[in-house]
Image (cartoon, rainbow, N blue to C red):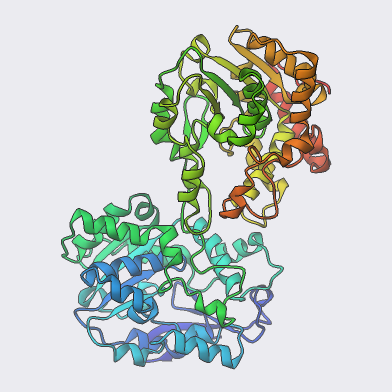
């Protein structure tokens, strides 16, 4: 049914009957919420919005008003705080003592409140907590007013850009959709059984509040050159926060010193921002408005990636700043490297090599963490990729030392170094100057182990299953991939006198024999008793309990999930428990295709 609300709101409105649009009703947790599409671009809203749409459209503006306008989940909260601090002379005391929603209210919030599936008491708590909540209250606010809105420009007052300052932020719609999905789950707006794949269908079919996404963004983009409009991309803000702060300051005619910029960047740093009680809305969890297992400020970071070199190796973009230092790293003749594709038996091989090369010094092996004895060369480029609570990253940096290239370069000889980099990205003189042990493992087992490793580190969304992960793996969208390019580089060098190429399957099938091969490679002689003792030390059950290698302390600081383990199962052939018939056939075809012009074959263990 199409209608017009009033003469002072010149837009047609289509009321959506949930009986005629069951796809809308099926998603929601509340059967009573109805929706409408507004205007020629069919913007989608809860029908409660219609009662306030004319008031917003005809709202009296002031010349010192400031608006932050975004499509939802596009970095709104961070931008509000940034703008408010810049425009209020860096008044951190007030920012800390006054909730952001009071300093920078949400214009159309009152039309959203009834959309939420809460008790009358919870709604009253929400209204009190989110003051000012109505248009009338916002209109009475003293100047200067700071106002947030998710409405498209066409539904805001027509004189908005002529009378006020507007900061608009756009974000990659794929990230928006993921964040919006978790936001709706946090607020109990969607049915618990609905997964992200289903949500994505709603998103791209414009059945999400404030959509269509592109109509919303493009309206602002067309006005980006207006002198009262600052158009920002969330990705650029998070990539270079100090530069974004300076752009905002310039837009508002403010001058900030480098110290002021750095202080604000630290204030807005994700880990600090997430803990900031004036913006994180955690009190809404205490009152049952938000679910207890989520967060209003969830992740907020876009991990960007890059492909490197002719073989298109895939890395978090942070690796690029480290890559030249690694490639040009000064090597020593007594350096030892263990190099593997991730989840190929690296930790076990490191411990084996270290014990063999250090005269079976089990006391030091027990008392000194493996990460200290045998550091991970490129770890510092990975640290920002992990998600952890509180000051976990800083604790991690202190626990895992040496962490940086500089610290590794300053280690006393002999150095033992672990890397997951392919040989082509390591120093060109690596095999001529150092000893290298490379370990390869069946990629199907690697993929299973990598999947659980990423879950342990909270790097994947909880609903992503292994079948989904496998698609990323075989399409070379996993860090350090492509898998076969990595392994085949080492395979081609297997006969170099400074290279020992091992298969994980052969190590686990006959550990004493593998120990002897490693000892021979390093010119060490081990008695049968020494081999047996090391084999017992490396036995999986003993190894899993070994505190110097199992990284259990990372659970205590929130780096690892509490329901997983760094050293998980360690068996060969376990992939069969995770692959269905279709995946097995796909894996066979993928392996055959990548090995067709090589003599590389996995051992039949």
Instruction: Locate residue 439, reporting x and y percent.
Output: 66, 23
Instruction: Locate residue 353, reporting x and y percent.
Output: 64, 22
Instruction: Locate residue 287, reporting x and y percent.
Output: 56, 83
Question: Which of the 4 quarters of the picture holds residue 275?
Answer: bottom left
Let me know if residue 3 appears in the view: no
Question: Which of the 4 quarters of the picture holds residue 265?
Answer: bottom left
Residue at image location 50% in from the left, 53% down from the top: 392
196 shown above or below 483: below
* Count of numbered badges drawn on the protein: 0
Let me know if residue 399 appears in the view: yes
Question: Which of the 4 quarters of the picture holds residue 70?
Answer: bottom left
In the picture provided, is 162 more to the left or to the right than 407? Answer: left
Q: Quadrant of the N terminus?
A: bottom right
15 shown above or below 41: below
440 shown above or below 386: above
Instruction: Locate residue 511, reporting x and y percent.
Output: 78, 22
Asked whether 137 or 17 is in front, the reply is: 137
In the picture provided, is 405 more to the left or to the right than 32? Answer: left
Asked whether 264 or 14 is in front, the reply is: 264
In the picture provided, is 282 more to the left or to the right than 501? Answer: left
Asked whether 532 or 16 is in front, the reply is: 532
Q: Quadrant of the C terminus?
A: top right
Residue at image location 78% in from the left, 31% down from the top: 539
In the picture provided, is 453 more to the left or to the right than 330? Answer: right
């Amino acid at each position: 049914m199409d209608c017009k609300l009033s003469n002072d709101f010149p837009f047609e409105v289509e009321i959506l009957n949930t009986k005629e649009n069951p796809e809308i009703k099926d998603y929601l947790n509340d059967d009573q919420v109805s929706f409408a599409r507004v205007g020629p671009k069919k913007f989608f809203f809860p029908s409660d919005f219609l009662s306030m749409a004319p008031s917003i459209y005809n709202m009296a503006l002031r010349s010192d008003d400031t608006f932050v306008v975004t499509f939802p989940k596009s970095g709104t909260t961070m931008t509000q705080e940034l703008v408010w601090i810049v425009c209020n002379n860096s008044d951190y005391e007030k920012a800390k003592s006054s909730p952001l929603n009071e300093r920078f209210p949400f214009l159309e919030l009152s039309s959203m409140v009834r959309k939420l599936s809460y008790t009358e008491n919870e709604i009253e708590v929400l209204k009190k907590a989110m003051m000012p909540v109505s248009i009338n209250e916002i209109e009475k606010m003293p100047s200067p007013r700071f106002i947030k809105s998710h409405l498209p420009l066409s539904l805001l007052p027509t004189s908005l850009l002529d009378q006020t300052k507007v900061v608009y932020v756009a974000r990659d719609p794929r990230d928006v959709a993921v964040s919006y999905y978790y936001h709706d789950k946090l607020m109990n707006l969607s049915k618990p059984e609905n997964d992200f794949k289903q949500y994505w269908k709603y998103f791209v079919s414009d059945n999400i509040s404030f959509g269509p996404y592109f109509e919303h963004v493009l309206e602002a983009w067309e006005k980006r050159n207006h002198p009262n409009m600052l158009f920002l991309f969330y990705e650029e803000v998070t990539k270079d926060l100090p530069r974004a702060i300076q752009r905002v300051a310039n837009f508002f005619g403010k001058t900030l010193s480098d110290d002021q910029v750095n202080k604000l960047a630290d204030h807005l740093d994700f880990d600090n921002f997430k803990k900031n009680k004036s913006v994180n809305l955690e009190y809404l969890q205490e009152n049952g408005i938000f679910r207890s297992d989520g967060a209003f400020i969830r992740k907020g970071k876009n991990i960007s990636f890059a492909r490197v070199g002719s073989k298109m190796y895939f890395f978090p973009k942070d690796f690029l700043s480290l890559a030249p230092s690694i490639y040009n790293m000064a090597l020593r003749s007594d350096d030892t490297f263990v190099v593997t594709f991730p989840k190929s038996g690296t930790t076990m091989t490191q411990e084996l090599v270290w014990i063999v090369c250090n005269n079976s010094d089990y006391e030091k092996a027990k008392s000194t963490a493996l990460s200290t004895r045998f550091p991970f060369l490129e770890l510092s480029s990975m640290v920002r990729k992990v998600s952890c609570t509180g000051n976990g990253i800083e604790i991690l940096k202190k626990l895992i030392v040496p962490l940086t290239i500089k610290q590794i370069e300053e280690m006393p000889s002999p150095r033992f170094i672990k890397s997951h980099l392919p040989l082509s990205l390591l120093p060109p003189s690596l095999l001529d100057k150092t000893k290298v042990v490379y370990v390869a493992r069946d990629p199907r087992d690697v993929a299973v182990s990598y999947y659980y490793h990423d879950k342990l580190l909270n790097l994947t969304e909880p609903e992503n299953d292994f079948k989904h992960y496998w698609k990323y793996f075989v399409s070379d969208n996993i860090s350090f991939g492509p898998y076969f390019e990595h392994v085949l580089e080492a395979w081609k060098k297997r006969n170099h006198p400074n290279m020992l190429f091992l298969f994980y399957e052969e190590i686990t099938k006959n550990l004493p024999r593998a120990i002897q091969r490693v000892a021979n490679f390093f010119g060490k002689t081990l008695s049968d008793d020494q081999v047996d003792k090391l084999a017992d030390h490396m036995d999986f059950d003993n190894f899993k309990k070994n505190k110097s290698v199992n990284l259990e302390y990372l659970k205590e600081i929130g780096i690892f999930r509490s329901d997983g383990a760094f050293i998980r199962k360690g068996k060969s052939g376990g992939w069969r428990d995770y692959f269905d018939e279709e995946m097995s056939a796909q894996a066979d075809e993928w392996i055959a295709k990548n090995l067709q012009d090589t003599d590389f074959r996995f051992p039949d263990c």
